[in-house]
Amino acid sequence: MKLYVGNISFDSTEDSIRQMFEQYGEVTNVYVPMDYDYDRNRGFAFVTMAGAAAADQAIREADGAELDGRTLKVNLANKSSDRRSASSEDWASAVDQEEGTLSSSSWEEENI
């Protein structure tokens, strides 16, 4: 099961995160997204635990625990299909409502 680990220190590494979560069970993967502009992690990670029992224990015990001087926020990771991200059409529609302008889709219908 994949866990979201938030509020990690910029000093935290894949190894330090793996080491912490291995105390709750088998860790099959650790992914720490990097911000290449600043050459550091982005402040969160994803940890995949081998089983549900290990994931549940990790959530119960690591949520609120400290790692590298930061208090972690740990919960089940959302699948990307579960998240609602603003598409360009959503954004354009919001601009239409606020500014009374044509959205890109309306412009395309009228001009193509």
Image (cartoon, helix red, strand yellow):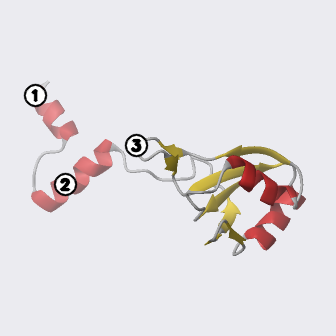
* Residue 4 horizontal/vertical position (percent): 65, 57
* Residue 106 horizontal/vertical position (percent): 17, 39
Spatial CA distance of label 2 from label 3 is: 30 Å
**Amino acid of disc 3:** Asp
Label 1 sits on a secondary structure element that is helix
- Residue carrying label 2: 95
- Label disc, if present, on residue 37 of the rendered structure: 3
Q: Is residue 103 left or right of residue 90?
A: left
Q: Which residue is drawn at 80% across and 72% down?
A: 61
Which sits in the foreground, 63 or 105? 63
| Above or below for 7 versus 88 | below
Foreground mark, 2 or 3, reads 3
Which sits in the foreground, 45 or 84? 45
**Amino acid of disc 2:** Val
Q: Earlier in the sequence, mark 1 or mark 3?
A: 3
Figure quadrant of residue 58: bottom right
Which sits in the foreground, 4 or 41? 41
Q: Residue at x 87, y 61 (%)?
A: 24
| Above or below for 66 versus 100 | below
Q: Which of marks 2 and 3 is nearer the N terminus?
A: 3
**Dots 2 and 3: beta carbons under 8 Å?**
no
Q: How many marks?
A: 3
**Amino acid of disc 1:** Asn
Q: Residue at x 58, y 62 (%)?
A: 9
Q: Is residue 4 left or right of residue 58?
A: left
- Residue carrying label 1: 111
Q: Which residue is drawn at 43% across and 50% down?
A: 85
Q: Earlier in the sequence, mark 1 or mark 2?
A: 2
Q: Residues within 10 Å of mark 1 (few under 14, many from 20)?
A: few
Label 3 sits on a secondary structure element that is loop
